[in-house]
Image (spheres, rainbow, N blue to C red):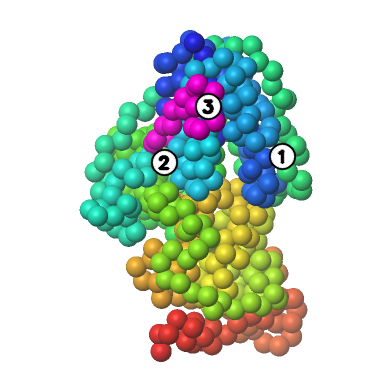
Amino acid sequence: CVNVVLFTADLRLHDNPVLGAALRAAERVVPLFVIDSGIAGAGLVTPARAAFLSDCLADLDGGLRARGSRLIVRAGDVVRETCRVAAEAGATEVHVASGASGYAQRREERLRSALTVDGRSLRVHDAVTTAVAPGVLVPSGKDHYSVFTPYHRRWSTERLRPVSPAPRRVELPRLRSLPLPGAGDLARGTAPAGLPKGGETEGRRRLAAWLRSGLAGYAETHDDLAADATSRLSPYLHFGCLSPVEVISRARRAASAGERHAGEGAEAFVRQLAWRDFHHQVLAAVPAAAHRDYRARHDRWRTDPDELAAWRAGMTGYPVVDAAMRQLAHEGWMHNRARMLVASFLTKSLYHDWREGAGHFEGLLVDADVANNRLNWQWAAGTGNDTRPHRVLNPLVQARRFDPRGDYVRRWVPELAALPGAAVHTPWRLGGAERVALRYPAPVVDLTEGLARFRRARGLD
Ligand code: FAD
């Protein structure tokens, strides 16, 4: 018999329970990827993600070819195309990973009913795109956790499923396929220059290097903007080139192998992966949180196109904010601490709607993810899961704490490269002619005024 594996956010051969289950249940398996018009139509395939995705598909196809198979590519409505391929192959079952977003949930429902009409069945697999599936951990009387700390406590004691190896062989029935799409076939426009290479092979190489030489120092250095000491695995996790279960298992194993500080590093690193699962279980339970305020409702946001443009362009006059926004434009990625502080700056110091910021991030981030992006933005804006929703990250305090020597700013804001040490964070303190020669904007907002405005809007005074 024949089964179809519909690859979505699980573009890998190692530790892929979807592929594993399909192979156990049939002699031949169709590895299918559909260039989904629904996702493209929603504007989610940006140049950065198109370039990364095209690498992922080429790598997946290469891995399948080495196992006697190949990736079958189709384009159009994902449900219609999957049903068509299932019919052409005479398949009994279609296997797919569960997803947290409203889109993924609807795709699953539509697939199930369309396949049932044809006399086939859909098998949905959990713990593929997250380590612990949404809905597995629930507080009594509720359908999800809305606070991270108790979630994390439960999550940390959860037994993860065993990691499975990549299959040795995949037998494929005869089927036609579109050519593998290049980045230009998926989206128009130029990808950021500093984009990493996508795909499972590259992801696994980076994971191994990270476990060897990054993990031990993570607890101490992950917030240091200039050190750039985080794993940068987020796009590989987002596209499923890496399995979160495998990443966590290997980090824990590396820690128990006993390198000095590896235990603390692994614990801090794995905690971030718990945040990832946390946001996914929130989104799975409340898909509307992608667009609507999750907890506290705020609708008195300010609109000021010039301010928003300055924030987007990295021209706010606050060097650490501008450095971060320029890193985003150049690399399609931004450090977590930087994401937090630019999001706080936009939503609290300037008091702009978090959806403006989330949308801009989605246009550029290679790891843009509905759950992580939208719910982190809500966290930063104080509309989401932050238990201290009124905290405001002052960009100057953040800069002095997380970029104490100013190296991060000098790396990304060349106009300020000649300013020494922490002086780079306060260019407005320079004397007249020196200041003008920098050709760097004056601060777009007075932080004290911004804070007072925020407190008034939130009814805190
Ligand atoms: P590491 O520090 O090495 O962490 C390891 C992994 O844990 C990451 O790859 C990521 O999968 C996960 N992780 C880390 N921090 C978080 C977090 N706060 N929430 C959820 N998961 C986390 N992450 C995305 O993957 N996609 C997004 O679209 C996204 N948007 C964000 C928007 C804002 C406003 C903020 C504050 C954070 C956002 N994050 C997002 C979370 C985080 O910033 C990135 O995951 C992280 O910077 C990726 O770098 P890294 O792989 O080196 O992380």
Which residue lies under the disc numbered 1? 186
Instruction: Decide: is 320 above or below 428.
Output: above
The reply, left or right, for residue 238 in relation to residue 78 is left
Which residue lies under the disc numbered 3? 117
Q: Is residue 120 magenta?
A: yes
Closer to us: 252 or 346: 346
Instruction: Decide: is 74 above or below 436.
Output: above
Task: Return the mark for residue 301.
Answer: none
Looking at the image, is mark 1 or mark 3 nearer the viewer?
A: 3
Q: CA distance from mark 2 to mark 3?
A: 30 Å
Q: Is mark 1 within 8 Å of ligand 1?
A: no
Q: Residue at x 65, y 55 (%)?
A: 363
Label 1 element class: helix
Q: CA distance from mark 2 to mark 1?
A: 26 Å
Q: Is residue 262 visible?
A: no
The reply, left or right, for residue 113 in relation to residue 187 is left
Q: Residue at x 54, y 79 (%)?
A: 300
- Which of marks 1 and 2 precedes in the sequence? 2
Q: Is residue 113 magenta?
A: yes
Residue type, label 1:
Leu
Where is residue 375 shown, x and y percent of the image? 47, 58
Label 2 element class: loop
Q: Is mark 3 within 8 Å of ligand 1?
A: no
Q: CA distance from mark 1 to mark 3?
A: 31 Å
Which residue lies under the disc numbered 2? 130
Q: Residue at x 32, y 38 (%)?
A: 252
- Magenta segment, which residues? 112-128
Q: Is residue 390 visible?
A: yes
Residue type, label 2:
Thr
